[in-house]
Every structure is written in C-alpha cells, then in structure tokens.
Amino acid sequence: MSDISVHPSVHQESTMLSCISRDELILQFQTTRQLTVHLCQPLAIEDYVIQGCDDVSPPKWHLAHTTWFFETFILMAANKKYQPYDVLYQYLFNSYYQGAGIPYPRHQRGILSRPTVIAVLKFRDYVDHEIMEFINNASIEILSAYYPILVLGLHHEQQHQELLMMDIKYNYSLNPGYPQYLSTKPHTTKQSINKLGWVNMTGSIVTIGHNNDSFCYDNELPVHQHILKDYCISDRLITNDEYLEFIESGAYQQSDWWLAEAWDCIRSNSWNAPLYWQKTNNEWHTFSLSGMHKINLYEPVTHVSYFEADAFSKWYGARLPTEHEWEHFAKTSKQSIEDTNFLDNGIYHPRAQISHSYQIWGDVWEWTSSAYSPYPGYKPLPGVLGEYNGKFMSNQMVLRGGSCVTPYSHIRATYRNFFAPDKRWQYSGIRLVCDP
Amino acid sequence: MSDISVHPSVHQESTMLSCISRDELILQFQTTRQLTVHLCQPLAIEDYVIQGCDDVSPPKWHLAHTTWFFETFILMAANKKYQPYDVLYQYLFNSYYQGAGIPYPRHQRGILSRPTVIAVLKFRDYVDHEIMEFINNASIEILSAYYPILVLGLHHEQQHQELLMMDIKYNYSLNPGYPQYLSTKPHTTKQSINKLGWVNMTGSIVTIGHNNDSFCYDNELPVHQHILKDYCISDRLITNDEYLEFIESGAYQQSDWWLAEAWDCIRSNSWNAPLYWQKTNNEWHTFSLSGMHKINLYEPVTHVSYFEADAFSKWYGARLPTEHEWEHFAKTSKQSIEDTNFLDNGIYHPRAQISHSYQIWGDVWEWTSSAYSPYPGYKPLPGVLGEYNGKFMSNQMVLRGGSCVTPYSHIRATYRNFFAPDKRWQYSGIRLVCDP
Amino acid sequence: MSDISVHPSVHQESTMLSCISRDELILQFQTTRQLTVHLCQPLAIEDYVIQGCDDVSPPKWHLAHTTWFFETFILMAANKKYQPYDVLYQYLFNSYYQGAGIPYPRHQRGILSRPTVIAVLKFRDYVDHEIMEFINNASIEILSAYYPILVLGLHHEQQHQELLMMDIKYNYSLNPGYPQYLSTKPHTTKQSINKLGWVNMTGSIVTIGHNNDSFCYDNELPVHQHILKDYCISDRLITNDEYLEFIESGAYQQSDWWLAEAWDCIRSNSWNAPLYWQKTNNEWHTFSLSGMHKINLYEPVTHVSYFEADAFSKWYGARLPTEHEWEHFAKTSKQSIEDTNFLDNGIYHPRAQISHSYQIWGDVWEWTSSAYSPYPGYKPLPGVLGEYNGKFMSNQMVLRGGSCVTPYSHIRATYRNFFAPDKRWQYSGIRLVCDP
Amino acid sequence: MSDISVHPSVHQESTMLSCISRDELILQFQTTRQLTVHLCQPLAIEDYVIQGCDDVSPPKWHLAHTTWFFETFILMAANKKYQPYDVLYQYLFNSYYQGAGIPYPRHQRGILSRPTVIAVLKFRDYVDHEIMEFINNASIEILSAYYPILVLGLHHEQQHQELLMMDIKYNYSLNPGYPQYLSTKPHTTKQSINKLGWVNMTGSIVTIGHNNDSFCYDNELPVHQHILKDYCISDRLITNDEYLEFIESGAYQQSDWWLAEAWDCIRSNSWNAPLYWQKTNNEWHTFSLSGMHKINLYEPVTHVSYFEADAFSKWYGARLPTEHEWEHFAKTSKQSIEDTNFLDNGIYHPRAQISHSYQIWGDVWEWTSSAYSPYPGYKPLPGVLGEYNGKFMSNQMVLRGGSCVTPYSHIRATYRNFFAPDKRWQYSGIRLVCDP
C-alpha cells in the first residue's frame, strides 16, 4: 500500500449508483476528504514539507495528490473544457500514471517548498467544491458513468490516509528530537497474554476472491477455486516478547534462517531488530507516534520486513500462511471485525491481544508467503486507470487484514495489500502456520 | 540456474543405489566430469580468468567449484581424516554455502589469477581420483549413504556446464573483437515457418510435481493437485521476427506494456532489444558463440528478461503461462524429448522450429508467470546441503523446458529453473497463453 | 565559502578591543545578526526547511548554526556554568567542528522539520540577548579575551549570509514553478560594452597577504614575498556573450580544452552550459532570484565551475590568473571598492560593466589557477577553533574579489575564498590573463 | 605516474639527435623495450589478464599500450600509408588520448581475455621491428623530426615499467594465496638506525626547473626563480617504526590531524594503516613482492597516501616540504644518485637507511605539500601529444625523488611525479620539514 503500490482499479459492475442518493454520496465524499486533513492537524507547517526517504512522501504531497486524482479522473475526464486549477500541479502531483503525463520524480518530492501548505489546501477546497457541484448537477447518465471512479477515488484517499500516518511516523523517527504526533502515552499493560495456540483448519477446495456487490479492487477478482491441504494457524499474532527471543537467540547473525536476498539485506543495512527499535541502556525501546518509549512485550511485533517474518517463522519451526490459507481462515473464523483496532480508533499503534481474539483484523498487516500475482483470469480495466492494473506484480508479497492505521471501512477478507519483501515502514506483523 | 540459484537438494528416497553398479557409477561420474573440461577446449588460458560482470564466473572458477563440491560434501564428509587438497581452495571455491564457511566474495572471482588453470586441473584430477577410489572401496553402507550426494553432485556439475556456456558467451560478447567459441557459422535458413497457432487445453484438477523414482530437486516436491481452467497455449515459441515487430512498434518507448519495475529497468539500462542484439547499418545483428552475425528471423527469440517476455505477451494480447499450465501441457503433449536441441548437440544456439514441433524441450527456457515459491508441504533437507533449499525463493520467476546449453539428461517436465526477472544472460525465450 | 569551507580562524593581534566601545560592539552585533533574518523575509515557512542537494543547507539551519557558533564559542567557553539553550541543538547545528562533538550528518539537514522556524528564531533571540548581556557585563579582561572570537563570529555570520543567498537560489531553481525571491525583474540593458582589453602588469617581487591591523582570516597570513613575471590581465570580466561563443563553438563536446577530471565531470553530469542556464525555444534563459528569464549578454558570466573557467581560458588562448597576480592587480589598480555590486545593494545578481570599471570587486568571485595551499610559515591557531585551520587545503581552488551576495564589509584584496573545482552554485566568474 | 597521469610531453630543444648514432639509438630502444618484457618473466599467463581495481591495468595491457604508443606516434605519424597492425588495437590500447580516438574504457581492461599474451608479444615484435627499420632507414630529416618522440616513447615505457611493478604487486595482494613475484625473502636487518636529524637550509631566491640539454617533461619547464625562507629538512625518510607510533597513538581515530577530505576518506575506507599492512596475531605484517611477512621497523614507511603523510607530519609537529624546498635540497645536498635503490637493483622494495644517506633518491617517492600546478610561463606542446600537457593539473599532489621501482635513468632533481591525495599503491613515503 505504498504510493507506488496503489492499485486504482475498480470492480465496475459491483458498484451500483442505484443504492445511494446524491446527498449521501456528497456526505461520504466530504467525510472522507475531511478526515485526511484532520489527520494532519497535529503537524507544524514544516512537517508537511519533508521526505525522510524515497519511499515516503511529504504530507502536503499526499494532500495534493489525492486532490489531483479527483481533478484528473473526474473533472477533466467528464468535462473536456475543464481547465486544471494549476497546470503545474498536473505534473507535480501525478504519482506514477504514465498515461497522464511523465510524473515529477518521486524521490524529489521533499525539495519542493512550493506550493505551500496553504496553497495546497486552497487546491483541495477548489476541487472539493467542483466535485460536489458535479455530483449535484451532472446528468444521471454522466454521474452513473463516473460513480465507480468517484468511489475508487475515495478508496484511493483512504489508502493515502494510511500512507500519511506511516510517512509522518517515519519522518518523525529520523529527527533526533523524536517529535510526538500524539500527546498521549502508549498503553503499557504489564499483564501477560495467552500462550500461542493453533487452530486446526481442514483442507478442501475453497473459494478465493471477492464475490458480492460491494466495492473491491480488481486484483481481488475473479472469484476462483483453490485446493487447500489441512493446516494449523496460530490463534493470535506474534508478540514483541516472542520476537525478542528470536533476536536474543542470535538469529540476525545466523545465515541459516534467512533467504539469500534477506541475508544480503540485513547485513548491508546492519539490521538487528525491527524498524524503529533501538537499544538504550541495555533495554529495547521503540519509536511510535507517542515518541520513543520502552517496548511493550505483549503487543504484536510490527515494522518487520517479509525477510524478517519469513526468517522468524523458520526459526520458530513453522512458516507463514499462504494468502489462500489466510483468506480461508478469515472467512471461516467468524470473528467480528468490530472491536478491532483501526485508524478510526485514533490509537495508531497495535494493541496487545484482548481476551481470546484471533487478531485477524486491524492492528498489523499480516505477511503471507504468497507473491503478489494475478488471479487466474485476471483482467485489467480499459483506459488510463486500467493502464496500471497489475503494474506492481513483480517482487511484492501479499499482506492481509489491515492495520491500526487502516480505515475500518477500507478492509475486507479478500483485500490484498502488497509490499516489496524488504519494506517495513508499514505496520506489518507475523502470523504463523504449521502443517499437521 | 545462475550459480547463486543452484539448489543442491536431493530427493533421497527416489535415488536407489540398488539400480546401478559401482562401475556404472564411475562411468557416469567420469563422463560428466570430462564433459565440463571438454566444453573448455576452445578456450585460451586467458579466457579462463575473466569475469564480465558479477553474475558470471570465470571458467576456471566453475572447474574448481564443481570439484570443491565433491571434495566437501563427499570426501570430507565421509572421512573426517581427509585433508583438503588445499585449505585455501575450501574458501575460494565455496559459492554460497554459509554453512561451509564464509565464501570468497562472488564479484571478485575475476581478480584471482591463481590458482592457475593447470593448478585447477590438477585439483580436478586429484579429487576425481579420490572419488573413484571412494566409489570402489567404500563399504556398501557408506556408499549407499553418499550415493544421493554423488548423484546430486553430477546434476550440480550439469548445471555448471550450462552456466559455463552462458558465461563464456557473456564474457566474449564484451570483447570488441568478438571472439568465436565455435568455428562454424550459425544456420541461416531463409525458409519461413508456420503462423503461430494455439493448442486448446481443457481445465481440470491436475497433478503437479515429480512422482517417480528418478532423481529430482526438492523444489519439485511434493506432488500435489492444482486446479486449472481451460487455456490455449501457443504451438511454438515466439520468433525473432515476431519480437522484432514488438520492437519496431515502439514498445520499448511505451510505458503501457511494462511492469513498474520493468519500466525502471529498461530505462535505467537503456534496453531497446534483447541482450546481445545490436543494430549496425540499420540491420539487427546478434552475438552468438559463432561471433557477431545478422539475426535469423525464424529462430526463437532468446536472451530476453522476464520483464520483456511479460511486456511482449501483453503487447501481443496474450499472457505468459503459469508453471502449472506449462507442466500440464508438457506432460500431456506427448511430444518426444528426442530430436531436440540440447547441449549434447553441440549447436549451443536455438534452432528454428522443425516441421510441427511444439518446441517444448531444449532451445530456450520458457518464462512462466509463476513466482518461484515452495510447493504446498515443501520440506527442506536436513544438514548443510539442506541449509539452502528454498534460500532463493524471493524475487525469482520460474522457467521451464531446458535450453540449447542444458544437458539432455538434466531436464524433465517437472524441472523448475528460476531467475530474477531482470536477468537475461541465460537462453530464455517466450511461449504464450491466452484464455478461451 | 561553502559551509564546509568556512575557516573560523582569526588574526588575534590585529583585532584590538581598544578601538571600539561596548556600545559600538553591540550595535555591530545587532546589525549583522538582524541582516541574516532580514534576508529571509521573502521566504515562506516551507522555504526554510528544504535542502536541494548535499552542498546547500536549509535556511533555518543557517539561522540556527550561526547562533550555535556564538553560543558554543562565546557563551559556553566564557562561562563553564552556562547551560545550552537546548542540548540537542548543540548536535544538530554543529557544522563540522569535530572538536565540539560529532556533527549531525550534513546531507540530512533537509529532513529535519523540527525545530520549527519559530523555535529557531527564539533560539536566536535568546542567544543574542545573552551575548549582549555578556558584552555589557563581562570584565574587560574577559571581554578582551573573547573579542577576537566575537569578531570572528560576525565574519562567520557574513559568510553564511552569502551562503543563504546561494542556497535559496539553488533550492528555488529546482522547483518547476520557479519561485521568485525578488519581485523586481532583472536589468536587461541592451547596450553593448567595451571590447576586452588588457592591462600590462610589470613583474617584480610583490608582497602577498594581509599586513595591517584589521581583521583577516589566518589563511591570509603570514605576509610574504612572491616573484611575479610580467603579465597582462583583462580589463573586465568575461561576459555571457563571450561565454556563449565558447558554448556555440562546440567546446563542451571537444575534449581538447578540458582537464581530464573536467572532461569526466561534464560528461557524467551532462553539462553544456553554466549552472541555471536552460535553452527554451532556441534561446538561452537563466534562473536568478527574479525567476527564469533570458540571459543578458553583457552581464558577467556566472555560476561556472573552475573546470569551465579553465577550459574557457584555454579556448580563448589565455589562462586564469594566479592568486598572486590577482592580488597584485587588485592592490595596484587603485579602483575604488565603492560603487560596486555587493550584497548591500540588494540586487543579488551581477551587473554589466559600468563605464570602464575593471570589475575587480563584487559581482562575481573570480577563479584563480591557484590551489588553496598554506602560505609559507602558515600557523594554525591553538584550541578548538584552530583545529580546522587549513582543514580544507586539498582539492580546492582559490577565488578572489567577492560577489553580488557578499557583504561589502566582508571583502578585501587579500581575501581567499575557495571551492572545489566542480562547484558552481556560488556566484563565480572569469577574468583572464595572458603572457606578454 | 599512474597511467592516467602519464605526461607525454617533451623538451624538444634539449634532445639532440647529433649526440647519438643510429646504432646507439637502436640499442637504447631494444634495451628499454626488453626490460619491460623481462619484468614480466615471473608471471603466469593468468597474471597478465587481471585488473585488481580501476587504477591498475593488466600486465598485458601495459605491454600492448607502450607498443601502441610507438605505433601511433611514430609509425603512423611518419608514414601516412602505414597500416596499423590491428585496427582494433588502436582502440583497445589507447590509454586516454582523446585526440587519437575515444579510448576503450579504462575500468574494463580486466575483462579482455583477447588479444592473448602471445598475440600481444607478437604485436610488440612487429612494432619493434618496424621501429628499428625506421631508425635505420629514415632520412636524417625525418629521423631528427621524430627523435624527440622516440625518446619520449622510451621515457613513457619506463613509466610503465614502474606502473607494471606497482600493478603486479596490487593484483597479487588481493589474492588470499599471496603469490610471490620474488623467490627471495626481504631483508630483515634488526639493526637500529640513526635518530631523525635535521639539515638546516638557508632561504634565498632559488632556481626551479630543468635547465640543461638532457630530456625532461614539459612540466619541469620553464626554469624560474622562487623565494624560499629558511627551513630544516629531515636527514632521512620516516621509518615504519616512527609510523607505527603514529598508528598506536590512535591517530587514525582522532580527527585533529586530518584534512576534512582525509577524514572522510579514512573513515569511509576503514583505513587504519598503510596499504598492504595487516595485523595478524597482534603483529603487523605487510605484503611485498616477496609475499606476506612482518614489517621491518627500520625501512622507510611506504604506500601511504598524501592524506596520511600530511596527517603524520602534523602529528609529528612538522610539515611536508614544498616541491621547491625538496628540489633545492636535492640540488644542494650533493648526495650521489649512485648506490641507491632503483628498479635496476631488482630489490623492488625500499631499503633501510645505509650509513648517513639522506635517502633522497630511490626507495620511495616523497610527498610534497605542493599541488601539481603549471610553472609560470608553462607552455603545452603543439599537436596531439601536446593535447594532454597539464591535463592532470587538478587535485594531484607532487612527489619527488623516485622509488625502488623507478628506473635509475628515469629520475632527476627536477622530476615531478604526481598522484591524487588518496592514492597509495605507488611506493610513496614521507620526508619532513620544520621551520627554524
């Protein structure tokens, strides 16, 4: 779900304008758009500008890019006479859509002081107003035609809400003053949690992919059958405590557990713990949006790369689930998606397991052992938006389940997130599987 | 099948010493070992030393490394009192087996003038003699225990025979004098070939993986069921002629066809044709082991990366086969593996289609759209050799069918070769699939 | 005069507290400190944060670093009980003084959003107040002891005023919207200027270096004798017009004119004109603090590297002056330093020659052919500040005469500025010499 | 005196054909050419091919390049009908003469297995024969015209004899087997040597540069006057013993002694001792052409960079000599250039001081504090050879006095060798100066 991994495709048939009024649509639009700005509220002007590494973007870029999306794919597409708010923005805030012109280089987003934050917010206001005018005034035919794109734009906005939180955290973490986004301290429950248990899953031919009328990305389609053998899946996420054992066993110094690329990666980057971990006075601390503090042993480990998740699983004597196993487990577990820890909670940090929750939803994205590949019969959409379907289907691994900075309404059992195996600034964690 | 991708694992149960006498084993051993040296016959001493890029190895390194393999995993393992021929060689000729000590850095193999070629050949002679003594004199229990490793060593040797040919070609190609390994000129049949046709394959639950007693690598196991939908697969390989159309349509300048990583790759490397292609006086030439010459339009295109194969397939309106589709096709097509173009032919270059051959075997490795992942229930072997099973299961794509530099006896329908998606010094080519 | 080339050394004997009252000193201090803040007035908050490349620094960093200098070398040095305003600032705003602790990495100054601009200005106010208290209240012995450091701090501040202007220009130039620091347009006089003439200088034994009581850096000492042969020096600076001829003759494509390192540099960076030049619609434009506009042919060429100045001189059939020749010329020419174009003018751009001025002072720094080496008998100062005298005496070339962004009171005939031969974001230009 | 620093310029007037017969010239030619081949005698074929880093060249490249020089600048220049021995060699063996066509990339010399060593030797034989024919048969006018180039070619050959020895040593040093070029062991005299003393030199106006009829490079011209102050110069070279004290004092960990670029260099390369030094079992060893062995404390330290020589001098409380001081000392010291340790001795390693020799000549090149700049009035030669005079006059420091791998007849008091300040594969050492 990095910016370069956004997959702006839609399942057109499943998004029906008939189910929703113009007013409801405007309300949804406003709510979603306002949340993005709201998430930036704790920032100083200076915080909107910086780009800590090539993978992250300045907050003001996210504000502008999501606006560019609506302007380009709705306003300009629906009305050939529409003049862009600023021609330069068309260039600066295109992320990677080659079909919409050569984009401004991603790694140089942090050297743009202009447009200023205020100028970007004016751009948002302008485009928001134009979109609402469009929703109110477009003919039913036109509106129906663009409705799927509007919905896509809102899901796109939600993806950037998650990226915004990831990027703010990353940028802050590089500052030796460790700025705090949250004024509250993190939970520090000392209470232990259950020993890791296993849920027995029976093999069968299972159905994979999205199969109802609600919105989904095209990578969740088509629905298809897949053969699963029996498997046992862990009844909760791996904790910091368990990961610490892995570290302290010397695993980062033993080649045995690591893929060849992983071993190169941890050595050339001198990794010896998850991202944001730091040993001070012989105690492990981590950086969160509340600043730097001791790790909580019972929270799910997070900010681990696929390489680390995979190595941990081997060291543990288990393996990571395939994405099919995960989806089957999620669909059959009947655990409620409610009372879970998503962006909406405002905690922005994974929570320790509560009672006997399987922790399927929220908290941390769960690495699977599945490469991000097209489902059998996968079809890209036509046109510019469709240009990029599957564009990222190389060297990416699938993650499932959402995180503490994913909007609640954004997630579902068939949702396929993906990151390159060495990335770890997303809130990613570990669930295990073993064979009976 | 790059050196770093060699997977030295064995299917122990399926390799039965009872089927073969000591004399036969010695004969197999000698034949295989001698072929490696024989392939080097056209080389000058200087040719044995150079390393054209990090991916390739000097020929004398291949000669020494394959010997190191037998010394380390047979002689030293079976006899704790065995003294290595040269302790330094244990370090220099370890490719990537961390469990056998930290290997000499791969990218610096080309700065070692010593040991000389003669010294390396003496090392081979010594170890060959010791291995034959071992086969003759070891107790039946010991020999049975090491028989699977011996067989593995021979398959390992065959992989390095292919690498040797690939690396010699690559090294020579960098020399502006274009040395010739072969004194013969390449075939230049002007005769056209059949228009591309499609074979209709019916979907079903198919069996994937190796399921008899002969040797296989562990990545071909376990046998398992897989669901396939109906698919149509091309009845021959894509030719230079067809690939030329792709080039001339401007495809290397159009982002539409390319994965995001592919687009970065072709632009940052200024790729505009397969490896070894060069436009001179407005005509496309290619470098082969016979030197530089005009391309033959009817030969299968080769030395394309996964990125290029994938882009070509999209441009053509088709896609690449999954490895399951390929294996199913190969197993059901009943086309003979004989009269095919393998290393044994001594041609070392793909041939144009002959009559109505599907070209499944030999000529060029066929890219599949499958990431190189473990089969369900995959188990690494115990011990040092097992240390590396699956070690390369990240960011690699599967190729099938063998090439004109693969030994005939090395290939089978379940054989999974793999390379990173940007590699193209292997003899790789393209077969297409489309959905009915 | 890059940040890394600041040479914080003083000629202690020549700076006499007896010449100046406490009030006058405070006035000087205030005036200099306020000018730095004043230069930032046209900036938006966002402009203070960015760092366009490793060589430049964010404006807020300059504001903080110059303050750090006074806090560290006056307040903390003079009063062991003094508590730093913020311990973290001691780390963040140390430029390169290893003796004052390991400095924060220079290339990462642009990823620090905090401290904010307001926080930095508070830091300035606090330290300014403390310094003024110190000047008012310190005993005469203490004040005398620290007076040379105070004066040094003010010259250091002036160097950063120049850097600030250079860095703002560089940062702005990278923004495709070409922000304007100045609201005024640049002069566009169409009037031609004099043909280049030569001033005959007679060789002799000349005196080089600073030889009066006023402030100078230690690299201007000791005064010494140097033998000069007869030479002819150009009576004005090289213009854009003349440099354009060099470009249009194909000089950037001809290896003949270039040093070996220069040829590598221009090819690997694809240089074909001075920094900030851009050909649009077949006309050369340049970026200045007034935005992007056509070049003025009669202005002195600027933003050329040593490599380009040297190549131009060879192409012209001349050479660059040695620093001794330049200093001799400047000392004997009797041209007034008044009516020249320095920072104080507020033009921030070189002016075309006015009447028959030799253009010795201001406008652009003049590259000399002299490597930046110690004068015979050069002595570093004792202590932390002295630690760095001469620290930059490798791979730097000397420039003379000041520029349009140098404060008027900062320059003198003996002043030795220096930059690496490939740098060109300073306002550097060309004067020629030929042998009779 | 690296290949890229070869300065193929001649002092035309000073080389008089009238002093030498055709037979004598042929003898000189043969002797010099044969020595180059002779120096390669201990090499295996494989040793001729490798290139340990970008700075060094394969031995066979040196053999071919020096031949290319004679073919290009004599045979092809004197006879327009002359056909190059092999057109490809014109490209492959051009070092950096842009005027003679774009040279083959230097860093890829080690990937050329062809032409083979035998082919290169044939090329040498052919060109040698042609040159001798030319000397015998050319008209006196033609021969006189090319005589300076012939002499230049021989000095060029001598420079490559030194480079050959440096490069063989460097290449061998990278091989963990530490091959031996020499079968003899190095001297290991345990006898101590004199305490470092100082020779008082009186300041005056001194004459610098070559001022007789013998051969010199153009960078030694014109003769000119220079003012020197009084100075004291060390009466011998700095030893390993003295350098060891520097190391053991922790100097490589203290920023105080180092230029800013030097500090970056030693940290980013993890330097903690001269090149080739290695601490094993708590004892310092070094690699020489006799293999790896303990350092001899009384030998001059060698293979130090300018950065290290400069830092050592500061740590010692002294400084390096300027090149003018060195030349003045060498000219006035009256120490014989005989009984010194040059290439001709066949020792190829610096010797400890013998009785009271100042060690001015041979053993190790002595770093000076002078940047490599043109002398006042310096004029490049006309034509292609002149194209490169002074081409290397940026970021290089001057060294003086020759080394144990410099041919005896190659050196003189005015000889200016030069290397970039971070290079140390040349036999470079340290002499100190202090001010009275």
Image (spheres, coloured by chain):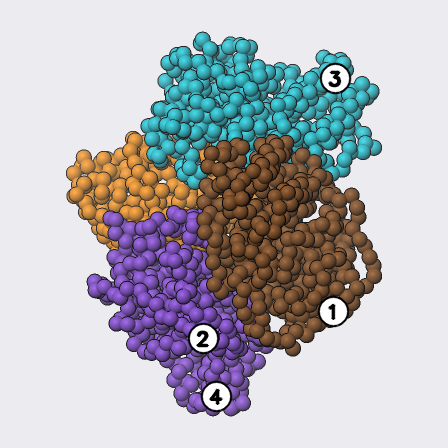
Chain colours: A brown, B purple, C cyan, D orange
Q: Residue at x 56, y 31 (%)?
A: C171
Callout 3–callout 4 Cβ contact below 8 Å: no
Helix, strand or loop under label 4 = helix
How far apart in space, not on screen, are marks 3 and 2 (Cα)?
Answer: 86 Å
Q: Secondary structure at mark 3?
A: helix
The residue type indicated by label 2 comes to Thr
Q: Are marks 2 and 1 in contact (CB under 8 Å)?
A: no
Mark 2, mark 4: which one is toward the viewer? 2
**Residue holding disc 4:** B17
Q: Percent from the top left, x then y, of residue B341?
A: 31, 72
Mark 1 is on which residue type? Leu
Residue that numbered label 3 is attached to: C26
> Which dot, 3 or 2, sits closer to the camera?
2
Question: Mark 2 or mark 4, which has the lower sequence index?
Answer: 4
Badge 3 local density, few (<14 within 10 Å), some, or many (20+)? some
Q: Which residue is mark 1?
A: A196
Left/right of residue D78 with respect to residue A77 in the rendered view? left
Q: Which residue is mark 2?
A: B414
Front residue (pair C260, D143): C260
| Quarter where residue D388 is shown | top left
For disc 4, the chain is B
Asked if badge 1 and badge 4 are on a common chain, one would say no
Q: Chain of mark 1?
A: A
